[in-house]
Amino acid sequence: MKARFLWLDMRATLGERKTLLSVGMMVYAVLVMPVLVAKPPPHVLSALETWFGTSDPFMLSLFIWTDLAMNKAICVLGVVLAGSLILRERETGVLQVLLSKPVSPASYYLARVLSACGVMALLYVGANLAVAPLIARSVPGFRAGVFFASMAVHLFAAFFTVCFSALMAVLIQRRSLAMLVSLLTLMTLVGMAFMGFYNPAWQGISLLNPITQGISVLGHVDDLGPAHVLGPIGILLGINAVVLALGALRVRQLEV
Amino acid sequence: MPAALLRYRALEARYATGWVPLVSLLVGIAVVVFTAWLIPILPAQVNGFMERAFLIRGYGAIILLNEYIGIYLLAYFAGVTGLMRALVEPRENRALEMLLSKPISRRVFLEARVGPVLLSSVVVGVVMSLLTGLVVRPFTGEGSPVSVAGAIGAGLFLTALAVLLLAVLVLPLLRVADTFQGLIIAFVLWVVTMMPSAALLYRPDLFEGRERLRDLIVLGPNLIWFDSAMLPLGVLALGVACVASWGALVLGARVFERTELR
């Protein structure tokens, strides 16, 4: 029953115009990438050497794709996909009808957030599958294994943006204000994500930032092992579970 | 203006803006202060990289570059949030017909809701600009490529640009029935104006032989390159943005007259 609800909700979201616009945004990011990585200037390669210990052009492409494209994209997509969960149903009077069915507010909330994560995963994986051959053609020494391992970890940071936006929606209960707070908080986390690389003394504290966990593979490109992938995924799963649980708790107290 | 209409405008202004300007202002002040504290304690290589990449020099310029992005972002997204609340949410909640059933024309409704939103964005941008001038003061003086007046002027310029983009955004938002569709449109519009700066960072060769174009479109660094001209330019830009916003509202009212309310 829940699987069917998830599937139907995902299909409905995929058919919405906002999802089509999101696809357009991702296509734009994919098309711009080969242009941006084609001819890196020496000062950028030298900075990479300082921060990540390598000036490999592949590393630059991974950095640009993660930071410039995907970090910004997941910020907005998280808010777009989950920023109005429950509130929209409540404002339009649909929530009362939905809750007359044998479904609790918390399980309805969880199902909707998981469905938004599913849509995020589809958009995210699609963009990465589309950009990989383009980067491979423009950048010598493209390492598909490292690229997809890094993006697999980052996908769980994308799920964090969905869970966080949903939590803000039910905490603040005003759609526009929740959107603004989610967007500003996520943009701040994205802006601070690489601080541990820029200044190794701040590495410990920067690991509290979920987006930093999502980009952590960039620090292990030359010695990548299963622990570098599974470790941050485990941490992000834990953070996401806590954020989801907080949202579900809040929804239980929400007035219909 | 009749007293009833004045009262109506005051009510709409209070509804359209809500807590958004205050939250944006508080976040904006925190961003300005935090950036001025953070940049000087970053490792020298990071600041050296920013100097080389964006063709600037000194702590003052690096602080300003980051402050400018903050001002532009806060003034714009505070306005975007206000516009969603003022224009898109009523359509989404199917309340637009009821709101327009009062003896109020669509033009008056649009002005009463959008005007305060644009004004609140100006307030956020102006306060952040003045504060930026204050925090950058210790890094100005003889030999510095930046000045307090230039910092305030550049902040006003970016505020004006944010208001102008918001005025342009009113037109698509009048036809959108989903807040988050509107958010994507708003985000893409903002990103387009920031793309030349990303191009300067990763592909400076694209601007070789096109220095005038670079000076014109690389938003952020270009305001530092022309620091001495920024104060009059910022004030002028704010004036132009006000006139252009009025024009966009007139155009928006015409579009709104022909728009289905559902």
Image (tube, helix red, strand yellow):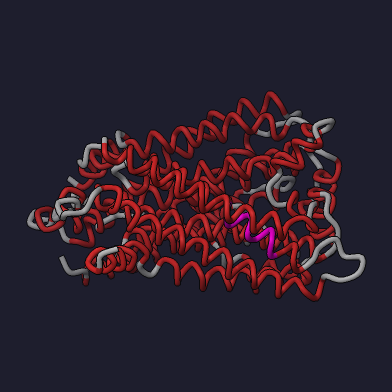
> In the image, is residue B113 above or below residue A24?
below
Task: Say which quarter of the image contains residue A251.
Answer: bottom left
> In the image, is residue A98 above or below residue B168?
below
Magenta-colored stretch includes residue A218: no
Could you tell whether B55 is left or right of B238 in the image?
Answer: right
- As drawn, the residue found furthest toward the right would be B143
| Residue drawn 74% across the image and 45% down it | A222
Q: Magenta stretch?
A: B152-160
**Who is closer to the viewer here, A27 or B218?**
B218
Task: Say which quarter of the image contains residue A119.
Answer: top left
From the image, which quarter does the N terminus of chain A lie in?
top left
Could you tell whether A53 is left or right of B76 in the image?
Answer: right
Residue B232 appears in the picture as rendered: yes
Task: Say which quarter of the image contains residue A32.
Answer: top right
From the image, which quarter does the C terminus of chain A lie in?
bottom left
Q: Whole-percent x and y of residue A5?
A: 21, 44
**Who is closer to the viewer here, B138 or B233?**
B233
Residue B175 appears in the picture as rendered: no
**Who is closer to the viewer here, B33 or A35?**
B33
| Residue drawn 38% across the image and 33% down it | A20
- As drawn, the residue found furthest toward the left would be A100
- As drawn, the residue found furthest toward the top would be A137
Magenta portion: prevailing SS class: helix
